[in-house]
């Protein structure tokens, strides 16, 4: 795709700032696309409590979390994120899930991008450690710990699913971000356009998936399955000259 068109598409998606690091796929795979019926539905309300972490601008929350996201601000999660207690984090399987978190009268929708400490003693339900900007949307800073109600909601993301491969040709680590719908990837496969047949990846940690298959010099298609068993296939999302460390965005999402 010509760079101009790529940046145009990015501009439409509101991602202009990222135009130099994100490449939008050409789309169109030819094979029969998988069709999911219906959409992810919000879950029941539960009780819990929130605290906050990081700085007033979200600093200290965007990099190096337990989900393996490299930079959640650049990956378009912004500061609308939360670390979630171990039961919700679920060994990394809960990464990418979205929650509506409601205080006394205001609510915020956040994506789980990190692991929080276990529930605070004396508090009810699960623990959400919100970024400070997210916390301040529903409570006052001096409140410290606030009881909330929360529920799983569909993730609304701009643009397609994003893939970044790091590592080396004999050990690939794939980071998957910006996943809509249920948001939590529970299975992932890759296929090349030449040698590589459909190959399952294994969760390394968080939302980092690994394979020892040699993926170099092939156009790559990824298929992800979210926790609600819906699937999305990103046909040829990486061109055959894909590079380690570069982020590629599919045309589609859930
Ligand atoms: C991976 O495949 C490429 C292209 O066929 C080849 O040149 C390269 O040597 C392979 N690398 C490894 C580590 O097997």
Image (spheres, rainbow, N blue to C red):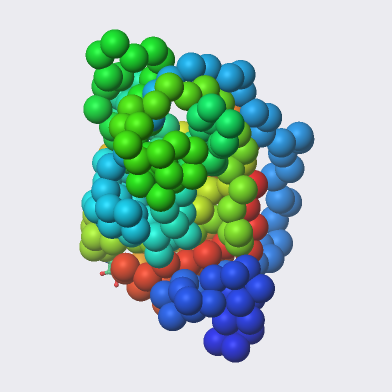
From the top left corner, tell me how far across and down residue 168 is, in percent: 23, 62
From the top left corner, tell me how far across and down residue 132 is, in percent: 35, 46
Q: Height in image: 170 above or below 207?
A: below
Relative to the observer, which residue lies in front, 113 or 53?
A: 53
Number of marks in the image?
A: 0
What residue is at 47 percent from the left and 67 percent from the top? 248
> Given the current orientation, which residue lies at the most extreme right position?
37
For ligand 1, the image quadrant comes to: bottom left
Quarter of the figure with residue 34:
top right
The answer to whether one can see residue 189 in this image is no
Relative to the observer, which residue lies in front, 156 or 131?
A: 131
Quarter of the figure with residue 113:
top left
From the top left corner, tell me how far across and down residue 93 is, in percent: 40, 32
Q: Height in image: 48 above or below 197?
A: above
The answer to whether one can see residue 94 in this image is yes
Q: Is residue 176 left or right of residue 1?
A: left
What residue is at 61 percent from the left and 77 percent from the top? 11
From the top left corner, tell me how far across and down residue 49 is, in percent: 40, 23
What residue is at 55 percent from the left and 87 percent from the top? 3
Q: Height in image: 211 above or below 18?
A: above
Relative to the observer, which residue lies in front, 113 or 231?
A: 113
Q: Height in image: 148 above or below 178?
A: above
């Amino acid at each position: 795709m010509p760079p101009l068109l790529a940046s145009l598409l990015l501009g439409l998606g509101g991602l202009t700032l990222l135009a130099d690091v994100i490449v939008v796929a050409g789309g169109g795979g030819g094979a029969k696309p998988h069709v999911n019926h219906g959409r992810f539905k919000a879950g029941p309300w539960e009780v819990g409590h929130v605290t906050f972490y990081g700085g007033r601008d979200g600093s200290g929350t965007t990099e190096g979390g337990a989900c393996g996201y490299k930079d959640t601000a650049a990956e378009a999660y912004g500061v609308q994120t939360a670390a979630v207690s171990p039961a919700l984090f679920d060994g990394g399987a809960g990464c990418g899930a979205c929650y509506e978190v409601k205080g006394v009268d205001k609510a915020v929708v956040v994506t789980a991008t990190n692991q929080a400490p276990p529930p605070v003693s004396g508090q009810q339900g699960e623990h959400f450690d919100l970024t400070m900007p997210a916390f301040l949307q529903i409570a006052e800073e001096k409140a410290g710990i606030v009881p909330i109600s929360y529920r799983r909601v569909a993730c609304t993301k701009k643009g397609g699913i994003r893939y970044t491969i790091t590592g080396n040709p004999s050990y690939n680590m794939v980071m998957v971000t910006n996943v809509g719908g249920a948001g939590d990837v529970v299975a992932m496969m890759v296929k090349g356009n030449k040698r590589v047949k459909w190959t399952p990846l294994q969760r390394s940690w968080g939302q980092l998936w690994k394979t020892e298959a040699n993926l170099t010099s092939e156009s790559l298609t990824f298929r992800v399955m979210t926790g609600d068993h819906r699937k999305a296939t990103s046909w040829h999302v990486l061109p055959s000259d894909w590079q380690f460390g570069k982020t590629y965005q599919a045309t589609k999402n859930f």
